[in-house]
Image: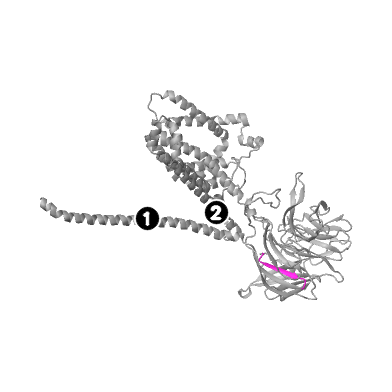
Amino acid sequence: MNSISQESSPVLSALNNHTTKRRRKWRMFKDKLAKYSMTVGGMSVIMAICLIFFYLLYVILPLFSSASIKEITSFSIASSSAGDTLYLAAEEKSEIGVRFTTNGHVVFFNLKATGNIISDTVLPIPENVAITSFGVADKATNVVAFGLSNGRAVVVKPVYEVSYPDDVRVITPRLSYPLGKEAIVIDEAGRALVHLDVQLGEEDNTLVAVTDDFRLLLVQATNEGSFLDDEDDEEEEIDFEYIRGELSLSFAAENEVTHLLLDKEQRLVYIADNDGQISRFDVSDKSSPELIQRIHVVNYEQKITSVAFLTGDISLLIGDSEGRISQWFPVRDKNNNSVLTKIREFHAQSAAIVGIASEERRKGFVAMDSSGKVGIYHSTAHRTLSIESISSNRLNHIAITPRADTLLFEDNQANLHLWAVHNEHPEVSISALWGKVWYESYEKPDYVWQSSSASSDFEPKFSLTPLAYGTFKAAFYAMLIAIPLSILGAIYTAYFMAPKMRSIVKPSIEIMAALPTVILGFIAGLWLAPVLEQNLLGFFTALLLLPISVFIFGYISRFWFKFRSVDGWQAALLIPVIILVTWFSFAISPPLELFLFNGNLPAWMTAELGISFDQRNALIVGIAMGLAVIPTIFSMTEDAIFGVPKHLTIGSLALGATPWQTMIKVVLLTASPGIFSAIMIGMGRAVGETMIVLMATGNTPIMDFNIFEGLRTLSANLAVEMPETEVASTHYRVLFLAGFVLFVFTFVINTVAEVVRHRLRKKYSSL
């Protein structure tokens, strides 16, 4: 037998060696496979994050690009019969331009074919009557008016008819006379109208004029039809009801009126003079205009060289002889009086501003100066987007198309310059996104998010500050509720609770993490919010009585259960106490609220304390989001505490420390890296939460730390507005910017948390 064993042992040894080698190779292969799989997975995650980062930048960066303009063509428009240009305009497609001239001609010309004249219409102006003034209504109406030397005015409107013969688009221009072809009598005394403006509305229209003897005249014509349709009314006789008003202008003898403007609501008239003053008149009652303010708007050594309305006719843009452009609009003072106030100033040009053209659909404008330079600006964003030299000659007239993509200039040599504009996102600037902005009709600068409106006069309000503030507010109140409950609960569960009870409690809390947040938000918004509003006093009473009752019960239980085996089960014994105290608090709430607060605590808080109350508020968000965050923080904290080596606790207890001393000075310090990580991960969850905030708050982007006020977070705002925004629009890109801010904030918080965690681990690893 020994000989057989000895003979077979080399064979067995060889087989064993062969099997061992195969197993070793297979194990090495699996190790390498796992290594490379983990490497590829980790690198894929990093690459995905980088791709997300760079894609967000790709969408966002165009927001901060400047405007650019490029010359398309230039040509001469000199015509001895038509006369000099009074006003220059173009239709929406940038294919046809129109000139209104000093000789009463309206000349339509082709912008795509070097100025070829399409039509030249002569206005019905009587012989021996001269054109002495010219006025332009709100750009959306395309209405202009000629003031005559006999005290009358002719109102015309260029109309562009689009047809498609042979499937080819053809634009045919013509003139319409919305108030009739016959000149309207403005001054019954027949004095020359040296300044004129006009506004047409759905029911009323108003013409305002200044005569050569310094009288302000108003004529309101009312007709049952609309003045803004495109019907050919040249032959139609229109009957109007007239209301006339007159006011003698009390200017100094040496002053001269330089500009006259009537707002599109036909309520305010602005008159500028050569002394640098703006006079504001209330003409709501057309029969008795009233001077309400006169203010100096430029430096005393400067002159007003240009005045124009910003789109919406709320703000005035005033250019001076030094190249400054200032924005003014009425603001209510402490006495509730409307006072014309300077809001902001632009000073990117050095020569006198000789023309300002406002964009029709945005709060931007273009200004030209006497040196031939043109500046593109945006008022709300307070941005100077581009400064470009157009011509070495002096520029006399400027026009911008309704789409703000083409500019027309005429210089003093009767040359027309056509320039293309690329200016997609002028509404955005760092100050508009994060600073206080003084918006039109606001009493002071403020942080406002209001991204859409049905009106084309809307001033976009893209402040991300209230959204970021709402994000921090929601996270703060959620963590205020989640941190104490989850940390203290984890300490008790891991260190003091009986093992059998721990095996029930820990999985039960962890399974809460699987509860969809949309369910929590739904319950919080539709059930918890109204219940809490009706029982607010009961909620506060429970907050007060629960800690007291728990303390009393704990003190009594020291003697009651002294000789009973209940160690580690005290939490179970507390459940009936907590239920009973909570029921008692809500039961006494109605009579107590009726006795102390007349039955309505929220109304009393608003009336007596000035604390406003919304049903869906930060308290509801804190409770609901806190419940969503608690399982994450609790589970990680409990694992960190339970994982503290037993020899540390045993050694501490052996040296005479009490269980609480051991917990505070040994266990918590050792577990602090894990506890800190749990808190930061919970905070990241709270910051990025969407559905709970979306459903449990009023979604109001306000900056108020009041726990009873609503809020709007960055993530909720994305969920609400992203589905409805136009792709590649300013709003669309700003929403991506909000997502980028959330991305960066989460990344920074997690990075800081990881650094702190490593330092804590290094500091307490020697324990």
Q: Label 1: how many residues lie within 10 Å, few (<14), some (14-19) or many (20+)?
A: few
Decide if residue 174 is in sight here.
Answer: no
Q: Is residue 412 magenta?
A: yes
Q: Position of residue 56 (x, y in %)?
A: 54, 58
Disc 1 + disc 2, Cβ < 8 Å: no
Mark earlier in primary sequence (1, 2):
1
Q: Secondary structure at mark 1?
A: helix
Q: Is residue 557 visible?
A: yes
What x and y, as percent, mark residue 566? 39, 28
User: What amino acid type is highlighted by mark number 2?
Assistant: Gly
| Three-letter amino acid code of the residue under disc 1 | Lys
- Which quarter of the image is occupied by the C terminus? top left
Position of 58 compared to 209: left or right? Answer: left
x 48%, y 31%: residue: 578
Most common secondary structure along the magenta stretch: strand
Q: CA distance from mark 1 to mark 2?
A: 34 Å
State the image coordinates of residue 624 (x, y, percent, origin top left): 51, 42
Q: Position of residue 753 (x, y in %)?
A: 49, 46
Pointer 1 residue: 35
Q: Residue furthest front?
A: 766
Residue that label 2 marks: 739
Q: Is residue 480 above or below residue 221?
A: above
Question: Which of the two discs, 1 and 2, sits closer to the camera?
Answer: 1
- Residue 653 vertical placement versus 151 (above, below): above
Residue under the point 59% across and 44% down:
710
In the depicted view, which residue is nearer to us: 316 or 526? 316
Residues rendered magenta in the picture: 404-413
